Amino acid sequence: MSPERGGPGDDLLRLPKAELHVHLDGSLRPETMLELARGRGIVLPAKDAAGLENAMRVREAASLEEYLERFTVTLSLMQDAEAIERIAQELVVDHAAEGVRYLEVRFCPSLATEGELSSPEVVEAVLAGLDRGGAECGVVTRLIVCALRNVAAPHSLRMAELAVAYRGRGVCAFDLAGAEAGHPVHDHAEALALVQQAGLPVTLHAGEAFGPDSIREALDIGRASRIGHGTRLIEDEALLARVRNAGIVLEVCLTSNVQTRAAASYASHPLRRYFDEGVRVSLCTDNRLMSGVTLTSEYGCARDELGFSLAELTRIARTGFEAAFVAQDVRARLLDQFDAAVSR
Ligand SMILES: [Zn+2]
């Protein structure tokens, strides 16, 4: 996928960026999918890269559920360590090519245990790929372990235990992903208590397919310091003020939100309002394959559709590094490098 997609221009490509919200199983290269499928006897919805890219891409007016259906295809290719490691490594390389210096990839390990692997082996394979890509490209990488909110609580507790076990060994945080409506945060209170007790940071998908109550629970029960999306925070002024005053960072995914109808259009996306009101925001891709985006093209959308200046986008990029789930010395180094690069 070309970083130039959407024509965001060299200044946005050169801007050092942090990617805080990208799903491993939503960000495969179509060419790699074809190769993996050939070697594994798996039939894909198209026979060439362009056809596959088109088939996997979610168009406007899809529901979140329809969006999530595409993942059964990618996950069918992610059931062995070699495939997972390759996909993770390539994701780092693709991000590096568009100026990303810090990358947090998220994934639910139990989704890759249909074959030979256990959940810890899946984590090891993802980390091996991230390490390899990071070393090749000079990108600092971390893994966020997701649990699926639409699966019963014993699952989220197992994922929380796994995240804690790999804390400091590449896993930086815990997340609840999957279908949000009808699957509230409080269903997973036990898992969240476990990660809080261990001092592992929490970011939760909230306010995407469900309203402000979901965001409130993410803060009250999840103690989330970042929120995935937060698109519907706009519906509750008091909660918006709370998020701003607490310095909670929103991981905003513009194209994904338009595709799942969390936002009616780019122009009406609340990102502009959040930024103007002092809410800390970062820009993220969510799923490079399903959304047909790069991080640079998402910055381009913010500029072209919502009127963000380069100075404003530079501030948003810096917020991404500030919000990184890393040790203080690593964050300080990333911020020093960022400041040096943008002052040139
Ligand atoms: Zn997401």
Image (cartoon, rainbow, N blue to C red):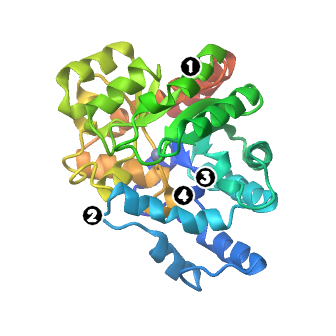
Q: Are marks 1 and 4 in contact (CB under 8 Å)?
A: no
Callout 3, which amino acid?
A: Leu
Q: Is mark 3 within 8 Å of ligand 1?
A: no
Assign a secondary structure to mark 1: helix
Give the mark nearer the N terminus: 3 vs 2.
3
Q: How many marks?
A: 4
Expressed as whole percent of the image width and height from the top left, the position of residue 159 reads 65, 36
Q: Which residue is mark 4?
A: 26
Q: Closest to the observer: 201 or 272?
A: 201
Q: Residue visible at 57% across and 79% down? A: 49
Q: Closest to the observer: 81 or 210?
A: 210
Q: Tell me the quarter of the picture where residue 46 sits.
A: bottom right
Q: Which residue is mark 3?
A: 24
Callout 1, which amino acid?
A: Ala
The alpha-carbon separation of the residues under discs 4 and 3 comes to 5 Å
Look at discs 3 and 1 and give the one toward the viewer: 1
Q: Are marks 4 and 3 in contact (CB under 8 Å)?
A: yes
Give the mark nearer the N terminus: 1 vs 2.
2
Question: Is residue 16 positioned above or below 89 on the image?
Answer: above
Q: Which residue is mark 1?
A: 193
Question: Is residue 233 positioned above or below 67 on the image?
Answer: above
